[in-house]
Structure formats: C-alpha cells, structure tokens
C-alpha cells in the first residue's frame, strides 16, 4: 500500500492542519466562512466545466483540501465559542449564587474529595447551560450518584491554570472537554436534593443492578473494584495505592477501560458470532451485530469520552476486519479519526485521544517490523513473542506523549504487560460470565473464588514490580517541538524500513537507495538536536521568582547551572508538604540544575533586586526602601502604614493568604497607587 494514495489520508491531514492553524493562530472567523465558500465555488466550477485535464484536476484537488482545511479551523472556532446563556457568561467570579446542578459523570475520587462532572441547569432561577466540576468532601459521606439533582448556594470558581513555569494547565484541560468551572460544595450549602434514579435509562439501571450484584457476590474489595474498572469503567472504588502501583509498573491501561478492553471484547464477540458468517451477507450481518453490541456496551458503561472514542474506533475496525482487504485497518482508523474530529475537533488536543490513536497506529505499523525480526515454529513461543512485540510497539508509540504530559516512563512495562496481557482476555471473559450468572441467579461460588485468587495475585505482583523504583524513569521534561520531531523521525524511519522487512531475510538488509522518508528522518533528527542545543544555551537566564503555592510560600532564584528554592510550608500536614515540595522542585526553572533547598528568609536579594517577606509575625525593616514586598500567611498589618514606611515599588500576595484579606489589601493599594499582584490571579511573579 502506497502511503497517501487513499484520499481520506490526505483529507484527514488537511483537516488536522486546519484545526492546528485555528488553535495557534487567531484570525477573524468570517474569513473561514469566505474561504469555505470560495473552495466550494472552485470545486463546483471544475465539475460543471467537466474538463478534467491535469490543471483542472489540480485545481479541484486543492479546492477539496482547502475546504477541509478551513472546515477544521471554523469548526474548532465555533466549538470553542461560549453561548450567551452559558453560566460562565452570567455568574460573577467569587460571588455566591443559587445553582441547580445535575451530576452527569462520576470521576475517580482523590484523597479528600468525591468528584463529578455536572450540568449547570439554572443560576439564580434563570435557565443556563454548561458543565462544571463538582467536589464534595469525602468526610461528609454524601454518597451522590450520576443523575442526582442538587440545588446549592455557592460560587463557581475558575479551575487552576499553570501558575508556575512548567505546571500542568488544568483550566485548559477542562476547557478542552467543555468544563468551565469548579464548585467546592460543603454539606451546609446544599439546599435541596432529588434522586435521579427514575431518570436513568434501562442500561444505566442495569449497570446499577450489576454493581449491586457484584457487591453481594462474595468478591473481596480489591478484586471487586478491579472488575468494576475492567468491565464497567467504574474506577471510583479502586484503591489509590493499587492505581499508583499499576501506573508505576507501566500497566495503568489495564485499569482504564479503553481501546484495549474494547478490542478484547470485540474479539470475544467475533468468536461468539462467527456462525453468522455462514449466512448470506454474513460479513455484513456480523459487522452490524458487533457494532450494535459495542454501542450497547458503551451505553452500559456510561458513555465516557474514552469509551466513545474506543467504540467508534473499533466499530470501523470491525467493518475493516470483515472486508479483508490490504490496508483496511489503516483505512478504518483514518475514517474513524475523520469522523471523530468532525464531531469534535477539540479531541485532537486531548491526551486520551492522542494516546489511543498513537498506541493503535504504532501496533499496526511498528509491530510487524519487530515481529519480523524473529519467527517461531512453536505456537506457545510465537504467542508470547507476539505479545512482547505488541507491547513494545505500543510503548514505543506512546512513550513520547507520556514523557511530554507525565514526565515519567516505566522501565519495567515489558515485565508487567507480559504477565497481564495473556491473562486479560480470560479475566474479562470470566468477569462477563460472572455478571451474566449473577443476573440469572446461577450459583457463582467457584467462579468468585477463582477471580478473588487470580486478581489478588495480580495486584500483589504488580505492587512488587512497581516497588523497584530504580526502573521508573522520572522527571523527564520534553517540549512540544521535541516531541513532534521525535515522532516524525521515528515514523519516517519505520516507513523507510518497512518495504525491506517485506523481503526475504537474505535480501532484507540490502538497502538500494535512500528515499524522501529517510531524508525526512535525518532532517528531523538534525532539527531535534539543534533545538536541544539551543534550549540548553538559552536556559541560562537569571530569574528571581515568587511562586504560587496554595497555603504556602515559595521563592525561586536560578541561573544557568544552579537554583535555590526557598519555601515556607509550615501550616501544611506532612503529606501535603512533601507533595507540594516535589511539585515546586519540578518547575521549569529548577530542571536540570543543581538545586538547593532552604527556608524562606525575611529579606532576599539577587542581582540588585530586593524582596522583603512580611509573614504572620508582621515584622519588617523600615530602613529598606523601594523594594518588592511579599505578603505571606495573612499578616495582621496596617498596609497603609507599611506603604508609607517602605515606599514599595510592588506588593505581591501569594497563595498563603486568605482571599478576603487580599481583597482588602487590593483596595488599600489602589487607594495609595501601589500595584498589588495576587499569584492566584497572575501566577508566578518575576522580580526585576
């Protein structure tokens, strides 16, 4: 199969290019509309004239590609546009309102909060739209479920953005999935509650019944939670320690219901429906049945975005597998990506979408190359070899994305996957059988005991693997362009070598001549090393930063080779202080440098810039003038007197202060014409 001969490959590339163009370059959206109309006019003109000479074909092709380029850009713009009745357009930041919420999706809880996505139905009795993140204290033990409706008196806050250099931009992530706020709901603020039990569809009621049956089946807590995650996508009951061990061992994808599980379920369903192939039009009948069953499964699990993507992908793959044509899997993946991006172009920027497609694409493209290096006549050895090559190909594909977003890579992923992947089809099959037997009230003691034993063994083994910290590669930070260039180099090298691996072993390594794929690979590597060299050269700037840290204070001073991090985290408990310190140590200014930790000083200076820290002791030296003032831990001071005493050029309030105190300081500073910066609003502040 020659790459890009299939028209949808080229159309998809132009659609993606248009989405990227609109994401990073702001232009008047009406220009997209004019350009789309112009492209359609050119294409229709060529069709009407009917003279398909070489020149006309080129014009027609360019018109079609331009059409999809501008469709991608326009669609992204209008998807990002917030409607006039969206709650974020009407509510005032930080002010309490009467909010009517409908819980729409349950998320994995953290140590302190139960978390849901919710639809905002009304704000102060006015109908509105939009989604928000809702957090309930776990200590309140409220036990809300998807579909429940609440009326609360509270404010909607904006999610945290990347306040320090290199921080994860949580606000941008939530925006990409249409969530524009977060509400911390305390129990006394809940005005009314209505159960959503009666609003649930048949499949969601069935899911609730299954969860109840599993709870009463005799399964232990950890195996039960694992089955709920594997088959129903319900991860909220999985022990956080189990999640961490699976992540560190490189097998977290086992717990996250996604393409891997849907692919296994597809294979099981293909096996169970294989007799349909004997019928007339059997392939099409089987494909239709498989697609209907996959979407019923998606509805049963609650239609999370990851499941929607996976089921859409494997619906196309199910058809492609029955067509049995060369390249049909590639065509199916391309069509699926095209449909998904037409539905929502913002998917392109979601981590789950990127990981799913990169893993599947890498398996399809890279695995045959690795598998062809060695062949086995023994079926068992060949089975294990194929699992090894599939795992390796998938990890090669997702490594760059994992390092870019999560900054770590599990060195023992092969060991964990070699153990789990052969067992996973049997575990999923046994779990589905258990659920079926429970629903028909058939005795399941033998199956429950077997799953308890096997799943407890898996959990303990994964925990043992994850305990080998030396094999977990952490704190690896790569830029977006480094990630892109690495992928271009990798896939162009694979595409260059792929034709040679289709030859016999004797002829395989006789390379006749380079082609443009090899040239692209070499050019990408040159650019990659050049970019890393420039990055290393330009990272030597001296910086004096007041960082943002909730309920704490931090200051970073850095140059090319060294950095000093000053912190005051004394009001935090030990666990939170350790986590906060690790996050502060990992900011962009401290990476790859000799880092020294120290406690926050009352007076700091660097390269002629001075910073006076006024903490809860409210003490300061009146002899220092025109310095920058950092107000820390809500000191009880007369700010107007401090301004008269010190004549500061700038006052900074960090995340350790109470919000209402900072608001009062802001009024005083405005009155005295002194600038006050709040790190909650502006993030880290550089002192010049």
Image (cartoon, helix red, strand yellow):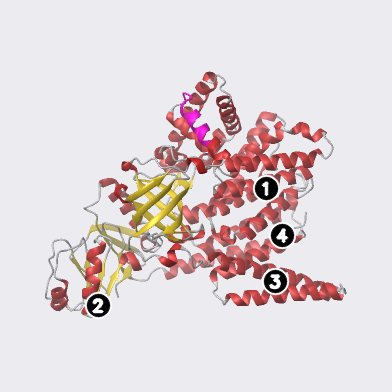
x and y percentages locating residue 230 in the rendered image? 53, 37
Tag shown at residue 113: none
For the question of whether residue 647 can be seen, the reply is yes
Q: Which residue is mark 1?
A: 364
Q: Position of residue 502 (x, y in %)?
A: 76, 48
| Contact (Cβ within 8 Å) of mark 2 with mark 3 | no
Asked if residue 213 lies in the magenta stretch, the reply is yes
Residue 9's label in the rendered image is: 4
What is the spatial separation of the Cα atoms under label 4 and label 1, in whole angstroms? 16 Å
- For the residues bearing labels 2 and 4, Cβ distance under 8 angstroms: no
Tell me which segment is drawn in magenta. Answer: 207-219
Q: Residue under label 2, please give it.
A: 670
Spatial CA span between label 1 and label 3 = 29 Å
* N-terminal label among 4 and 3: 4
Q: Secondary structure at mark 2?
A: helix
In whole angstroms, how far apart are the C-alphas of marks 4 and 3? 14 Å
Q: Position of residue 454 (x, y in %)?
A: 51, 26
**Secondary-structure class at tag 1:** helix
- Given residues 450 and 150, the one toward you in this image is 150
Q: Nearer the viewer, mark 2 or mark 3?
A: 2
- Check disc 3 and report its element: helix, strand or loop: helix
- For the residues labelled 2 and 3, the Cα–Cα distance comes to 51 Å
């Amino acid at each position: 199969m020659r790459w890009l001969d299939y028209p949808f490959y080229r159309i998809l590339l132009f659609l993606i290019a248009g989405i990227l163009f609109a994401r990073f370059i702001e232009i008047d959206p009406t220009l997209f509309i004019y350009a789309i109309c112009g492209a359609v006019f050119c294409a229709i003109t060529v069709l009407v004239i009917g003279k398909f000479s070489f020149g006309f074909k080129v014009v027609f092709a360019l018109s079609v590609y331009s059409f999809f380029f501008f469709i991608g850009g326009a669609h992204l713009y209008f998807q990002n546009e917030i409607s006039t009745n969206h709650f974020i357009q009407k509510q005032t930041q930080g002010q309490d309102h009467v909010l009517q919420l409908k819980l729409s999706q349950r998320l994995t809880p953290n140590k302190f909060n139960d978390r849901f996505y919710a639809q905002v139905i009304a704000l102060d009795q006015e109908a509105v739209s939009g989604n928000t993140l809702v957090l309930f204290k776990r200590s309140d033990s409220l036990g809300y479920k998807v579909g429940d409706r609440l009326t609360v008196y509270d404010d909607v806050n904006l999610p945290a953005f990347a306040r320090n250099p290199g921080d994860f931009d949580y606000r941008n992530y939530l925006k990409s999935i249409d969530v524009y706020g977060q509400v911390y709901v305390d129990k006394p603020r809940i005005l009314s509650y209505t159960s959503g039990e009666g609003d649930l569809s048949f499949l969601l009621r069935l899911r609730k019944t299954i969860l109840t049956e599993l709870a009463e089946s005799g399964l232990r807590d950890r195996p039960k939670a694992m089955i709920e995650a594997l088959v129903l996508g319900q991860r909220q009951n999985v022990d956080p320690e189990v999640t961490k061990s699976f992540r560190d061992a490189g097998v977290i994808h086992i717990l996250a219901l996604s393409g891997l599980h849907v692919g296994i379920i597809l294979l099981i369903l293909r096996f169970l429906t294989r007799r349909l192939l004997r019928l007339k039009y059997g392939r099409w009948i089987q494909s239709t049945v498989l697609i209907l069953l996959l979407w019923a499964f998606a509805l049963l699990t609650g239609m999370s975005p990851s499941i929607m993507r996976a089921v859409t992908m494997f619906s196309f793959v199910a058809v492609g597998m029955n067509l049995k044509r060369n390249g049909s899997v590639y065509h199916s993946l391309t069509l699926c990506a095209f449909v998904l991006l037409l539905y929502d172009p913002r998917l392109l920027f979601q981590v789950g979408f990127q990981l799913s497609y990169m893993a599947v694409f890498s398996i399809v493209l890279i695995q045959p190359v690795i598998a062809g290096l060695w062949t086995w006549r023994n079926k068992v050895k060949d089975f294990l070899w194929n699992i090894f090559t599939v795992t390796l190909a998938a990890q090669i594909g997702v490594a760059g994305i994992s390092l870019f977003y999560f900054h770590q890579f599990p060195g023992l992923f092969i060991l964990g996957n070699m153990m789990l992947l052969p067992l996973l089809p049997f575990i999923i099959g046994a779990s589905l059988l258990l659920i079926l037997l429970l629903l028909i009230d058939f005795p399941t003691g033998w199956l429950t005991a077997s799953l308890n034993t096997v799943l407890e063994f898996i959990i303990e083994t994964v925990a043992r693997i994850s305990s080998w910290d030396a094999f977990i590669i952490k704190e690896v930070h790569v830029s977006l362009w480094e990630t892109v260039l690495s992928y271009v180099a990798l896939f162009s090298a694979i595409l260059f070598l792929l034709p040679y691996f289709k030859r016999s072993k004797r002829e395989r390594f006789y390379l006749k001549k380079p082609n443009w794929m090899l040239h692209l690979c070499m050019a990408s590597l040159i650019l990659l090393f050049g970019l890393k060299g420039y990055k290393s050269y330009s990272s030597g700037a001296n910086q004096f930063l007041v960082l943002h840290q909730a309920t704490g204070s931090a200051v970073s001073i850095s140059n090319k080779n060294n950095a000093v991090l000053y912190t005051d985290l004394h009001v935090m408990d030990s666990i939170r202080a350790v986590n906060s310190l690790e996050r502060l140590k990992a900011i962009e200014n401290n990476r790859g440098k000799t880092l020294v930790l120290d406690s926050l000083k009352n007076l700091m200076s660097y390269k002629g810039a001075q910073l006076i820290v006024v903490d809860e002791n409210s003490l300061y030296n009146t002899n220092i003038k025109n310095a920058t003032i950092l107000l820390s831990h809500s000191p009880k001071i007369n700010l107007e007197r401090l301004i008269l005493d010190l004549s500061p050029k700038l006052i900074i309030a960090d995340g350790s202060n109470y919000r209402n105190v900072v608001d009062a300081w802001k009024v005083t500073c405005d009155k005295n014409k002194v600038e006050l910066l709040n790190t909650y609003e502006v993030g880290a502040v550089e002192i010049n």
